[in-house]
Amino acid sequence: METITLEYVDVFDENKTKTLTFSKHLIKEPFNEKSLFANQVDGKSMQPVINHKAVVITDISNKILVDEAIYLLYYENKMWIKKYDGKKEVFISINKEFSHLVYAKEKVHIVGRVLLTFTTF
């Protein structure tokens, strides 16, 4: 089995650097292995699809916008994970409690497309 190992910082465990190893075959679309980035989610705006404290894998070489896909964004000095609404050309939260978090495509920097999510315990 071909695996990928990435490091990320666990912001809920004293900022310890941790590793995540997973099968390459879990990623169902073309990706650039050298451009994969892992980071931990702090927030509930994407629940139930992406849970608080989950680790997401992003391909930072993939910035092509696809309707309904999820992206890692940079906006107002923070990283955000949002779903792209291609009809309105905005990035939105999935959790209705955070429906006020809407970002226009031209106001954000697209870091990359989220490919996988791992729930941590």
Image (spheres, rainbow, N blue to C red):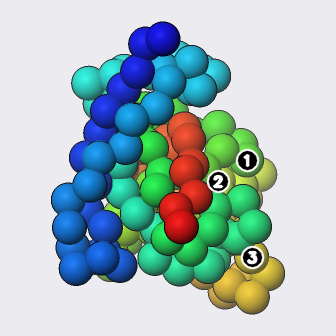
Instruction: Look at discs 3 and 2 and give the one toward the viewer.
Output: 3
Where on the picture, by quarter, is residue 26? top right
Q: Residue at x 20, y 59 (%)?
A: 17
| Residue 84: assigned label | 2
Q: Mark 2, residues whose alpha carbon is within 10 Å: few (<14), some, or many (≥20)? A: many
Give the secondary structure at mark 1. loop
Q: Is residue 102 visible?
A: no
- Residue 105 in picture, x, y percent from top left: 52, 58
Q: Position of residue 48 (x, y in %)?
A: 75, 67
Return the mark for residue 95: 3
Q: Which residue is mark 1?
A: 68
Closer to the camera, 55 or 67? 55
Q: Quadrant of residue 10?
A: bottom left
Judge the density around disc 3: few (<14), some (14-19), many (≥20) Cα neighbours within 10 Å: some
Q: SS of the residue at dot 3?
A: loop
Mark-to-mark CA distance, 3 and 2: 14 Å
- Label number found at residue 118: none
Q: Badge 1: few (under 14), some or many (20 or more) residues near its Cα, within 10 Å?
A: some
